[in-house]
Image (cartoon, rainbow, N blue to C red):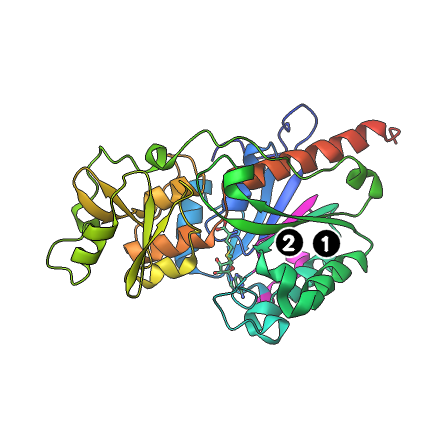
Amino acid sequence: MRGGGGCGEGAGGGPAYRVGSMFAGIGGICLAFRDAGAEMVWANELDHLACETYRKNFGSEYLVEGDVRGIDPSSVPDMDVLTAGFPCQAFSVAGYRKGFGDDRGALFFEVVRMIGAKSPRAVLLENVKNLVGHDEGRTFESVLQCLRGRGYSVAHAVLNSKDCGGVPQNRERVYIAAFRDPADMEGFAFPPPVPLEIGIRDVADPSVRGDPSLYYTEKSPIYAALDAAMGSPDSVYQWRRTYVRENKSGVCPTLTANMGGGGHNVPLIRDRFGIRKLSPEECLGFQGFPPGFAFAEMSASHKYRQAGNSVSVPVVRRIAENMILAMRRADGRRPLS
Ligand SMILES: C[S@@+](CC[C@H](N)C(=O)[O-])C[C@H]1O[C@@H](n2cnc3c(N)ncnc32)[C@H](O)[C@@H]1O
């Protein structure tokens, strides 16, 4: 485990802030907070295979595998920051959008339950951009109200990974930062845009042969259509039922959990050796995971789902750095007790 155990020193000196993560998935948010200098003390995730990948990269010290609805908060350690990328299907454009009326949407109230029980100093929530406009803004207002009603100051921003994370993926997500103490909020701002300095080739190198299973052959019924439409090695393409869509912005389209449904949902590139799907590892690369991060042993479809379900790590790391900085500044101003 890299830089996690014990009550270590946080970045910039002083004790590391303790972080807990609900709906932890494979740990994208955890990785970001850890890289920002925080200490992971608790995480929960239901999906066994996501837990397998989590344990492979973070060890098994503090991850609780199981349904969050069965978790007794008294078994959860105290924490400074609670994070949650709560399930988004109920709010996403692609889903049925029943919001809190959907079992998966109602899982947000598990976050509220945990905040009520643990009273963390700060909270970071992440979800699809569509949460903001869902039900004409009423759903989002309820989310913010739940936090304000518990005494938190709240800020939110929709950030795109290609603008704020330095990764070539078009991924807009809403991030909600909340602080119990207004002094913490005073010193906090969401990170500003940064220039995108890497392109598609830096993540999916067209001069390197991919795994043979990724390539389309002429036997595929859609090969001719792909071959005709996919001209550039600097674009990522998508097969859309009957046609090929080119992402002309020079970045990868939003990676989604339904890439795990197999079929043609996985974005495509043309490399020197043919036409192929991105590999699950390249999908992690487009999310800004470091090369050392590895999936546990499982089928490719599960790996794709895990990568699409996760977050762009550098975006969350920049937010985490700013949250930590804000708390440190406020701590510096507080008289010693
Ligand atoms: C959007 S993903 C979050 C991914 C995470 N932020 C990451 O970086 O990988 C939501 C996660 O919530 C998990 N989940 C869904 N229902 C759950 C439940 N009842 N209890 C615990 N986890 C649950 C899913 O398995 C999924 O991994």
Q: Secondary structure at mark 1?
A: helix
Which part of the image, by quadrant, shows the C terminus? top right
Foreground of the two, 275 or 293: 275
Q: Nearer the viewer, mark 2 or mark 1?
A: 1
Check disc 2 and give the amino acid type.
Val
Label 1 CA crowd tier, 10 Å (few <14, some 14–19, many 20+): some
Magenta span of residues: 69-86
- Quick check: 102 above or below 145? below
**x, y percentage for residue 316?**
57, 41
Determine whether, in the image, residue 336 is placed left or right of residue 142: right
**x, y percentage for residue 53?**
40, 49
Label of residue 313 in the image: none
Labels 2 and 1: the sequence-earlier one: 2
The residue indicated by pointer 1 is 118
Residue drawn at x 32%, y 38% as measured from the top left: 234
The residue indicated by pointer 2 is 76
Determine whether, in the image, residue 76 is placed left or right of residue 128: right
Looking at the image, do the residues carrying marks 2 and 1 touch, with CB atoms under 8 Å apart?
A: yes
